[in-house]
Image (cartoon, rainbow, N blue to C red):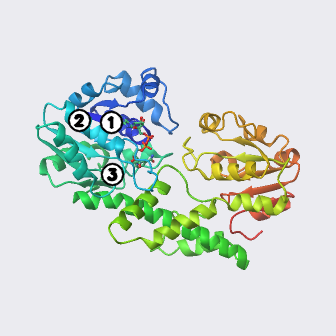
Amino acid sequence: MNVTVIGTGYVGLVTGACLADAGNAVFCLDLNQEKIRSLNEGRIPIYEPGLEPIVRRNRDAGRLAFSTDVAAGVAHGELQLIAVDTPPGEDGSADLRQVLAAAQAIGRHMKSWKLVATKSTVPVGTADRIKLAIEKESAVAFAVVSNPEFLKEGAAVEDFMRPDRVIIGAEDARAVALLRQLYAPFQRNRERVIVMSVRSAELTKYAANAMLASRISFMNEIANLAEALGADVEEVRRGVGSDPRIGYQFLYSGAGFGGSCFPKDVKALQKTAAEAGRPLRVLAAVEQVNEAQKHVLGDKIRARFGSLSARTFALWGLAFKANTDDMREAPSRTLIADLIGAGAAVRAYDPAAGREARRLFEGNGSVRILDSAMAALEGADALAVVTEWQEFRSPDFAAIKAKLKTPAIFDGRNLYDPAVLKSAGFEYFPIGRKT
Ligand code: NAD
């Protein structure tokens, strides 16, 4: 099939590359000339495990093209997948300007029937607005469907190639048939397509992210309570997760959730609900708990050291989670702001987000981004671990102790065994654990 993907970011690039890998002819369109230039020179602008060889293979085979040429992009695909960003607007609602700009571009340039599928996360009712935006520009027939994306950064290729489900919100039989065909190669052992109304599909994506965010905030509150009561949240997690109705996934407490999806989607769904006259009180609490949780590590550091002026802290992990370079709304950013706001300096290291961090903190004399975990420890008073990268799980504790002025580790991901750290001579400050 000829497919055009509009927006070549975390979702668009993975989608385009994986669809090309299944044999489709894919045109990835983006307005960002730098990104397209880099992709055409064989450089992947994001860190995503396993993505690079797929992009290279399919570009070399002539199945995957990158361009900023909107007219050519619209002409190419019978399928137009919209994967542009939908950032939070000032009032918390999803900013749909890029989605509607993409729709307008499709309308302006299309000369034959198109299936327009929205992979971006968009509020209920957006498909109707896309339809109107296209109709304003064109009299050619088309269909608009909702096809929300569920991939996870850090495991995006795996998720796309082996999806748990493919949600198709559509009223048009031809559109459903085409999308079934498009996704057939990714669900060989059993059917994973769930067809529903457009509005239900749009709401499903928000409901799923809101549910996951709720689990995190819930466990963070339980962790803080466990600390106050002398219980251990890791023991509680194992006990609670053993109930198959609850399960072990997404039950970890930590330094709060971040990333480009949960924070903005929790906000946008609340906005949609308020506008519908059905405010989501649970989600208001989820957001409030998360905002507070992002400060917990900073609070623990202040409680241990008192004044932070003239202190230096090493930070391991900057990305909002492991296996990505994405720092959007990352808890590390809140911690860094708290530390430098209190007069401290920060020496940080992340296996993939170093480039993004250097861009974000450029010109900030209080923050240095280092090239290794050990280099970040030089001259530091203590260590804070903020992202659960594999390489941080079993470090050389003797080497860490030799470098730190105070043998103290503030662990925002509960990576270590309190007993091991105690016997290694550390003061250990995890989240909700008994030490
Ligand atoms: P991103 O910011 O990484 O990528 C968006 C890309 O779209 C950018 O390269 C931007 O230049 C481009 N773009 C913007 N407007 C454009 C236009 N009019 N025409 C062409 N290109 C345009 O965003 P992302 O993380 O890939 O997310 C995209 C959407 O998918 C969002 O709605 C997000 O909520 C949703 N989503 C993201 C994830 C994720 O893990 N990142 C997962 C599921 C769903």
Q: What amino acid is found at the position of numbered circle 1 in the picture? A: Ile
Q: Nearer the viewer, mark 1 or mark 2?
A: 2
Q: Is mark 1 within 8 Å of ligand 1?
A: yes
Q: Secondary structure at mark 1?
A: strand
Judge whether residue 248 can be spotted in this image. no
- Residue at image mark 1: 6
State the CA–CA distance, disc 1 to disc 2: 10 Å
Q: Residues within 10 Å of mark 2 (few under 14, many from 20)?
A: many
In the figure, is residue 2 to the left or right of 326? Answer: left
- Residue at image mark 2: 106
Q: Position of residue 295 (x, y in %)?
A: 67, 60
**The C terminus, quarter of image:** bottom right
Q: Secondary structure at mark 2?
A: helix
- The residue at the point 66 percent across, 75 percent down is 225
Q: Residue furthest front?
A: 90
Q: Secondary structure at mark 3?
A: loop
- Please say if the residues under marks 3 and 2 sit with CB atoms less than 8 Å apart: no
Which callout, 1 or 3, points at the residue further toward the start of the chain? Answer: 1
